[in-house]
Image (spheres, coloured by chain):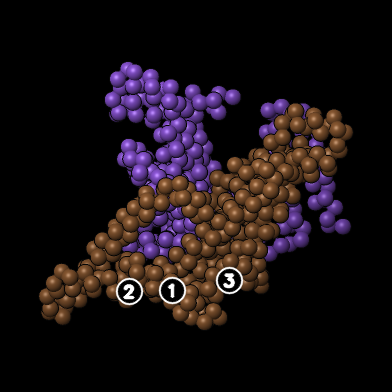
Amino acid sequence: MSAIPILGVWLAGLALNLWLARFDTRATRTAVALIFGATIILLWEMTVRIYQVPTVILPAPSLIAESVVANRSILWADFVQTILKGALSGWVIGAAAAVATAIAIDRSPFLQRGLLPIGNFVSALPIVGIAPILVMWFGFDWQSKAAVVVVMVFFPILVNMVAGLKATEPMQRDLMSSWAAPYWPALWKLRLPAAMPFLFNGLKITTTLALIGAIVAEFFGSPTRGMGFRISTAVGRLDLPLVWAEIVVAALAGTLFYGIVALIEKKVTFWHPSQRG
Amino acid sequence: MIEAWRRAGRGNLVPILTVLLIIIGIWYLGAIRMNAQWERDQAARAGIELSLPELVSRTLSQDRPVLPAPHQVAEGLWQGVAGQAVTSRRSLVWHGWVTLSATLAGFAIGTAAGIVLAIGIVHSRAMDQSVMPWAVASQTVPILAIAPMVIVVLASIGVTGLLPKAIIAAWLSFFPVLVGMVKGLRTPDGMQLDQMRSWSAGGGRTFWHLRLPSSLPYLFASLKVAIAAALVGTIVGELPAGATAGLGARLLSGSYYGQTVQIWSALFAAAILAATLVAIVGLLERATLKRMGLAR
């Protein structure tokens, strides 16, 4: 009996989406995605309430929202500690180091041929495992988290940047040399702009990595604030609504971080075919 | 790694080895520099003067160095793999197997779910518009970071062992496979689909003879990402306090007791495992695509 309202909501959402999907315009596409998300949350809420699922296993969305509001000062302090101090600073340092390295080895095909296979290889490794080592070296505060993030984002950005610096056409390079452009002006005016789509590809991939590195590093030791610290201690106290509140913040932060980088990409690489569509 | 070796055959071996030698050189210098302070303190306390060669040789053979030298890590790795019985709690093979079994179970579940959902998405526009935006958006969410929480919550309701870790690994390998497979199943262009229609092939035939074969290159590309992600997920899933088995638990206990050689050995064991898994998928890819005449 109690399953009937749940089934009803599910079927209503499904029917609405099946009907809307036939129009296939921009507005209906957004609507379909939003209805899907809303239906999931509604079903989640109803299931938890009707079957009285214990909070420890799965808190209801309304309870999580309450926890977000009630703990907003804690969440903000954790956000500053983990995302702004740990992840963002590490990401910026790592990206700068990777770009600088890519330009430094740009004139040496020998180093590129040596470094690229290693870079590709390292990108597939569980780098997050160096977190305990770096926490030991740099202490418990955000510096060690930033260091983990630097190592995690370095190689993906390096590999993309090196590929980007190769992305010019021979014709374009010939034009530069026919204008007698020296190395640096040619790099600045032709090859760096041409590398931007590749660089931003690397930057976008690594936004998620940066958050993961910063949060996971906190499991190996942290001051008494930070998202990883809060998640592990709140789990210990079985305060699951707070844990989910942190997850909501992490998800929003991740999407926002990616969105901002994608927005900057749009401004910088407005000339690229993929942005003109 | 296979890729790297194949390229090495074409004259990249010397550059790769050079860079590796440079890295090992920097590593040794770093080990001497970072471990020197402790040795100097020890010598000062004992009231003896250390000559430079003595200092260097001592920094490279500490019990708990800040940064173990490469040969110490190699020795620790060798001890862990060959110096113990495979069933011993100190054997890296045993811990590696614990991690590997959860990784493979999760990878299989995640891949199967990803492929099934991708097939649904390609054939239903409503599903495509409902699920795909969320699947793409979910890539920006640091899911891996909540892995330990999943473990603890499942443990509190009595689910322990391989399953919780496999769930995380499955979740992480699910999205790359889903996104790659949707892209792959959509590669046949209008002309090819029209050709199938002109042979009056039904939906099933079009799927088995056109869509599925042309999606395989995309599938293998995402499988490589997925198996690496599954391994990382399993290792992070082994981090919460209480875990005693697996490479992640080795990392954690090493960091608790300051056993740096143990951390580095576990780290390299994980790296070797990751490289081997990706290489195996790469071999399968080459063999399959070659048989299909799609080899590049």
Q: Is residue B163 above or below residue A186?
A: below
**For this rendering, which residue is in front, A188 or A167?**
A167
Position of A258 with respect to B60 (left or right) is right
Q: Which mark is residue A169?
A: none
Q: Which residue is mark 1?
A: B78
Q: Specify the amino acid type for callout 2.
A: Arg
Say which amino acid is labelled 1.
Trp
Give the CA distance from mark 2 to mark 1: 18 Å
Closer to the N terminus: mark 1 or mark 3? 1
User: Circle 3 sits on which residue?
Assistant: B98
Q: Are marks 2 and 1 in contact (CB under 8 Å)?
A: no
Residue at the spot x=61%, y=59% of the render? B169
| Of pointers 2 and 1, the one earlier in the residue sequence | 2
Q: Nearer the viewer, residue B115 or B292?
A: B292
**Residue ID at (11%, 75%):** B49
Q: Residue A32: x and y, percent? A: 72, 36
Q: Which residue is mark 2?
A: B64
- The chain letter under disc 1 is B
- Chain B's colour is brown
Image colour assigned to chain A: purple
